[in-house]
Amino acid sequence: MIKSYFKLIPFFLLGFISCTPEVIEDPNTIKQYLHLSHTKTEVNPKMDSTAETIDYAQFDMLWLGGDLAVFTSRDDSTMAYADSIFDLGNERTLWTLGNHDYPHVDRIEQFTNRPPYYAYSADKMTVVVLDTQEDRANIAGAQKDFLFEIIDSLESTTHLILLHHKLVWMQDHPELESQINNISNGEAGNCGWCLFPNNFNSVIYPKLVEAKEKGIEVICIGGDIGKRVNEFEYLTDEGIHFLASGIEAEQVGNQALLFSHNITTEQITWEYKSLTDL
């Protein structure tokens, strides 16, 4: 890992503090970020055995898409188990919460030292971690205000990354909504694990288009797949990327999503990689 210098800049919103470190790095560096999600088995706190043995320290950042264990926040011992694998308190481990990670958010905050939604900035990239469990998949109220404040304040930013668990951009989308039950782990509906009707396309997406029109590349990454498919990519007419990655524990062919960030050319590319090749 290349040594870094962090300058913490706090964002205050309704009592929550989100820190966005500015990182001074070697400009010739190509960094790698791994997105992994849905590692749970049906036996708490165990996770997919391959996912448990990956050396995550080899990546510059780890992006967790949620549903780490079947009841991740149930007790301190389960949280400690997840922490031993993913280093949850590391400021470069970003975790968007899934329905299997809820409901004890206070316990999660004790291990991560962060609220359920926050932002991280480095190398002209801003990552916003959203909580799609808070308001039945809606990004509303204080969380919406927080996201919009971050977007409005972006300067010298080349990439805006949104990490979220639910595939919120599929609902009410003219092409994607009909595919929900073939792609998303949570089918369309109002059950506890379902993909609820939400405000992403009506309220959040137009704000992302504003960022795109300013020359910022926008990438949304969901984590609630793995049961039916283990990869998903879609490019909107406005040039915004919808991606998703997730696994089904102990199944053949599990993949994670590996991002490469060329600091010199300011380009981010990605590919799906077998867990056994990481």
Image (tube, rainbow, N blue to C red):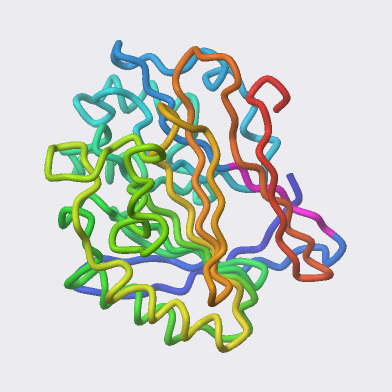
Q: Is residue 93 positioned above or below 84 on the image?
A: below
Kindly indicate the quadrant of the structure image that contains residue 240.
bottom right
What residue span does the magenta drawing correspond to? 29-34
Residue 148 screen position, x and y as percent: 35, 80
Q: Residue at x 30, y 14 (%)?
A: 42
In the rendered image, the quadrant that contains the N terminus is top right
Does residue 31 show up magenta in the picture?
A: yes
Give the side of residue 233 with respect to residue 200, left or right. right
Residue 197 screen position, x and y as percent: 19, 57
In the rendered image, the quadrant that contains the C terminus is top right
Q: Is residue 127 positioned above or below 79 on the image?
A: below
Q: Is residue 7 among what the camera can see?
A: no
Q: Is residue 155 positioned above or below 274 on the image?
A: below
Give the side of residue 228 with respect to residue 70, left or right. right
State the residue in front, 224 or 72.
224
Q: Is residue 9 among what the camera can see?
A: yes
Q: Residue at x 12, y 38 (%)?
A: 191
Q: Residue at x 51, y 14 (%)?
A: 251
Magenta stretch: dominant SS? strand
State the residue in front, 242 or 182.
182
Q: Residue at x 24, y 31 (%)?
A: 73
Does residue 41 show up magenta in the picture?
A: no
Residue 12 screen position, x and y as percent: 29, 75
Q: How many marks?
A: 0
